Image (cartoon, rainbow, N blue to C red):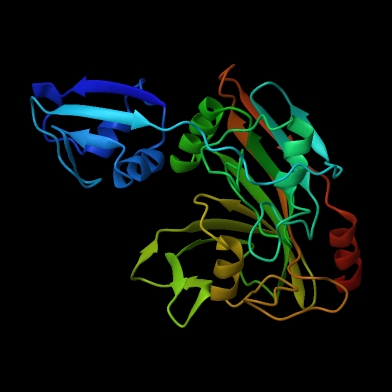
Amino acid sequence: MEKFVLNVEETDSGIRLDKWLASKKETDMTRTAVQNLIESGGVLVNGKTVSKNYKQKSGDVIEVTIPDPVELDAKPEDIPLDIVYEDESLLVVNKPKGMVVHPAPGNYSGTMVNALMYHCKGRLSGINGVIRPGIVHRIDKNTSGLLIVAKTDTAHNFLAEQIKEHSFTREYELVAEGRFRETEGTVNAPIGRNPNDRKKMCVIYTNSKNAVTHYSVIEQFEKYAHLKCRLETGRTHQIRVHMSYIGHPVLGDDVYGKPFKGIDGQCLHAKKIGFIHPVSHEYMEFDSELPEYFKEILRKVR
């Protein structure tokens, strides 16, 4: 357990506590992690608990208690991984279609996290808790492709900040239903929980977050199209929701479109990922070949 005390100066008066603490080198935490700490009572202002949006005042005494990391609950499993890149700070993994990223009800084993824990011998960032160690961002079970994994909390924070600032490169390829009138376009529509089905997301203008997807047509077929999508934001199911919203659901998407014979779930592949390395501060970019299931779908719809 780590404890320290900070004093608020006149120049920092009026700033939200969570924002201020997230900027301090003593915490080395994301703003979300700071908010969770405040809500759990790990931050006291003048000896009292406060809300995460508390605006501090000059002379405030901030006591911070950071608990020891909880031992990981997920169990290591010897499952093969397609590792594209690895160093002391991070890994880039090419996830196969059908593999769940982290344990959840109904999928407590056989996940990528179980495989990573075995491969990394438990040395993964603990910021996302005992069930999602190292996971900076996620892709759906039936989406294949590149995923970045953090080994240290410092690397996790650095990479998460890039995602937040939209400087993280994420490009996908997919097969969508229908014919496109334009060869490229942008979907700028907020995404939130579907009020009628909490397991699904939808374009909605209340209780939502802004979401932007840029797309271009690689090849147009008679009834389908091969697309490239670049994410400006990274909302849950973003590409699947946006494609369905404009009337071109991802082929095989049995949640936002309809099933397609010969494929289990959506034909969607996270093909390219790019980021600034947390230690070298150099830009790195990785590209993955389209998997066999994707090539087979292209052969079918041509």
Q: Nearer the viewer, residue 224 or 254?
A: 254
**Residue 263, image x, y percentages:** 84, 71
Between residue 52 and residue 86, name the one nearer to us. 52
Quadrant assignment for the N terminus: top left
Q: Is residue 230 left or right of residue 195?
A: right
Q: Position of residue 150 (x, y in %)?
A: 62, 33
Residue at screen point 66% across, 78% down: 257
Q: Residue 48 lies in what quarter of the image?
A: top left
**In this orientation, which residue lies closer to the viewer: 197 or 230?**
197
The residue closer to the viewer here, 180 or 300, is: 300
Q: Is residue 4 visible in the rendered structure shown here?
A: yes
**Quarter of the figure with residue 115:** top right
**Residue at the image point whose x is 41% and y is 36% from the top:** 30
On the picture, is 181 further left or further right than 225? left
Q: Measured from the top left, where is residue 159 in percent x and y?
A: 53, 33
User: Residue 28: x, y in percent?
Assistant: 41, 26
Residue 296, quarter of picture: bottom right
User: Which quadrant is the C terminus positioned in?
Assistant: bottom right
Q: How many marks?
A: 0
Q: Residue at the location (74% across, 72% down)?
A: 251
